[in-house]
Every structure is written in C-alpha cells, then in structure tokens.
Image (tube, rainbow, N blue to C red):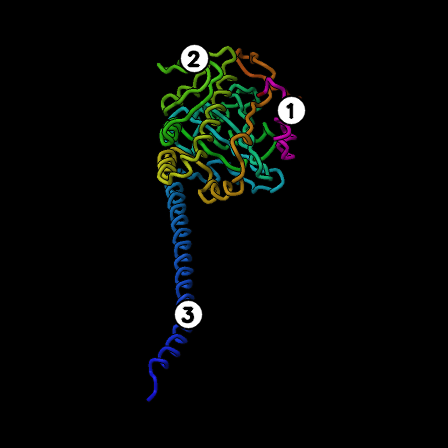
Amino acid sequence: MTDHSNFDDMFGRQDEQRERPRKKRRVWRKILVAAIVVVVLGVLGVGLYLWNVGRNFNEAANQLSDEQVFGDTKAKESNDKNGTNILLLGSDEPMSEVDMNDSRGLRSDSMMVMHLPESGSNVQVMSIPRDTWVDIEGHGEAKINAALSYGGLPLAVSTVSDFIDDDIDHVAVIDFEGFKGLTDSLGGVTVNSEQAFTRDGHEFVKGENRLNGEEALAFVRERKKFSDGDFQRARNQQAFIKGLINEMISADTLSDPQKIANMVTEFAPYMYVDSGLTAQYISATAFEMRDVRPSDIQFFTAPTAGVGRSADGQSIIEVDEAELKKVREAFKNDTLAEYVETAPEQHL
C-alpha cells in the first residue's frame, strides 16, 4: 500500500515551494500597480488643480487685444537675447469704468518695468516716478504719466519703451480694488517702512508693519508727507512688492492650494493684461524661474537729476541723461543685474 502521507508531504512541499515565489511576485506586482496608480492620481490631481486655477485666472482676468495695448503695431515677439520686459501699472480709479478702446484720461499712480533676464536667475524692477519729464510722441515734453492720459495704453507703452530704448513685451494694469483684494487674499503683507507716517487714519511705524488691504493701499499712495515726495513713495511701493513676494512664495502660501485659489479669485477680476499674459505663460515663466528667491529680486529707480520746474511752472523730476544711457544699454544687453549692483545710491 502506498504511503500517501509521504507522497503528499513530498509533493505538497514542492507545490508550496513553487507557489511561494509566484505569490510573492503577485504581491509585489500589486504594490507596484498601486504605487503607479497613486502617482498617476497625484499628478492628475495636481494637473487638474493647476488647470482649474489657470482657467479661473484666464476667465476672470480682463484680456485686452494687441490693438488696445500696443496700438496699430502688434507687440513684438521676444528676441530671446535680452530677456522680457513687463510694464506694470497701478490705476487710481476703477478699471471697470474705463473704456479701454479710448482710455484717455486714465491716470496711473505707479509705473514699473519688470525685467526677466534670459538666464532666469534673477529679476530687476525699475520704478519710474510719475513726474519724470520726458518726450511724449505727438505732445512734446511732459510728465511720463501724462502719456496714459493723452493716448491711453498704446501711448503709455510706446513712451516707456522709448524711455528704456527697448521693447515692452507684456503689460499688466491693476486697479486699487484689486490691490486691496490681493493683499487680503494672502491674509495681509508685512512691509518694512523706512519712515513713520500716517495716512487716512492709518499709522505706520519705522520698521515692520503688518498691513491689510486698506492699510497697504494707504501705504503705497502717500507722498506728500515725505520731504522727497514721489521718490519715497516709489521706495514704499518697492517695499510693499518685496513683502508681497515674500508672502506669495512663503511655505504657508505654497502649501495651501485653497489660499492660492483664493488669491487668484480675488485679484484676477481687477487685472487688465495683454493677450499674451495668460495663466499658461505665467506658469511656464514661473517654472523657468523656480530657483529665484526674494534676495534675487533687485529694485531700483530710474536715474534722475533732481526736482526742477518746467517752462510752464510744473514741478517735475529731471532725468540724468548720462546715467539713463547706461540703463538703456543694460536693458538691451540683458545686464541690468550688473547695473543695479553699481548704480549710484541716489537712484535706488
């Protein structure tokens, strides 16, 4: 009689031995598939989230046509040799009440040119005082912010382009309601004030100030309380932008998807941008400049030769033509970072 117990023991163990590797392979295969699913879902989730935020920006922001921004001459494509120049304007009146097809009479309390070098390693932001005395095509000499009033965005863009002797590639205008909304969507912004002063019932101390939207607006608009007027206002605007950038790229903001979504939802409706300044463009540019830190963002003011009087008695800011020539060369050669490092102190 055959001993089935030995037979079973012999072949049962062999079957178990054959089954174990197969089972282990199946387990690892399941783990691998699960991991892939998690990764795919994670990437898909981030992708859908970013797509949704981008869609919200594109739908809420006010896209302007090339003709509305640049006039009859369409904006030139970047030549990939000297970086990108973005004109930033702050409007002191609700943009929703402005006819962008005939925006004469519109005023800007702040005017800056943001330069993004081709290297993507840093950023330069040049403030242009609104009383800077320049030539405005078709109108002779006038304060630079008069260009917006004389001929709307196209004349403002061409005037600033002539001033820096380089192309303006993109334009963004935000009115003060959007300014407040952006600040409040971040839960406030911390700025470092060079001076103590008051405006509209708000008190600002020398040093750090935590500002909400209303306070931020008062902080960047004041100029009459300062001995050097528009120069100090430009420095305050720069201080605010530094604080804003610090807040936007802080861990608390970047790790909070809802905070990012709220920020876009709050300020996008008050943004007026050229047709090329889309969420896709902004996100692609941000990715290229992902290693830039707040310390890599340099601020300076257009070179001036002091306060003077125009022939008709206006108080104006005169241009340091010799220094402006250096600024123009720096824009054209994509060497603004080097220029700012050696710029005269009075221009900063």
Check disc 3 and report the residue beneath it. Answer: 22
In terms of secondary structure, where does tag 1 sit?
helix
Which one is closest to the eye, mark 1 or mark 3?
3
| Crowd class of label 2 (few under 14; some 14 to 19; many from 20; radius 10 Å) | some
Q: Determine the residue positioned at 50% across, 40% down.
A: 286
Question: Which amino acid, mark 1?
Answer: Thr
Which one is closest to the eye, mark 3 or mark 2?
3
Check disc 1 and report the residue beneath it. Answer: 342
The part of the chain drawn in magenta is 327-347
Where is 40 relative to 130, above or below? below
Check disc 2 and report the residue beneath it. Answer: 197
| Crowd class of label 1 (few under 14; some 14 to 19; many from 20; radius 10 Å) | few
In terms of secondary structure, where does tag 2 sit?
strand
Question: Which amino acid, mark 2?
Answer: Phe
Q: Determine the residue positioned at 65% across, 24% down.
A: 342
Q: Is residue 336 magenta?
A: yes
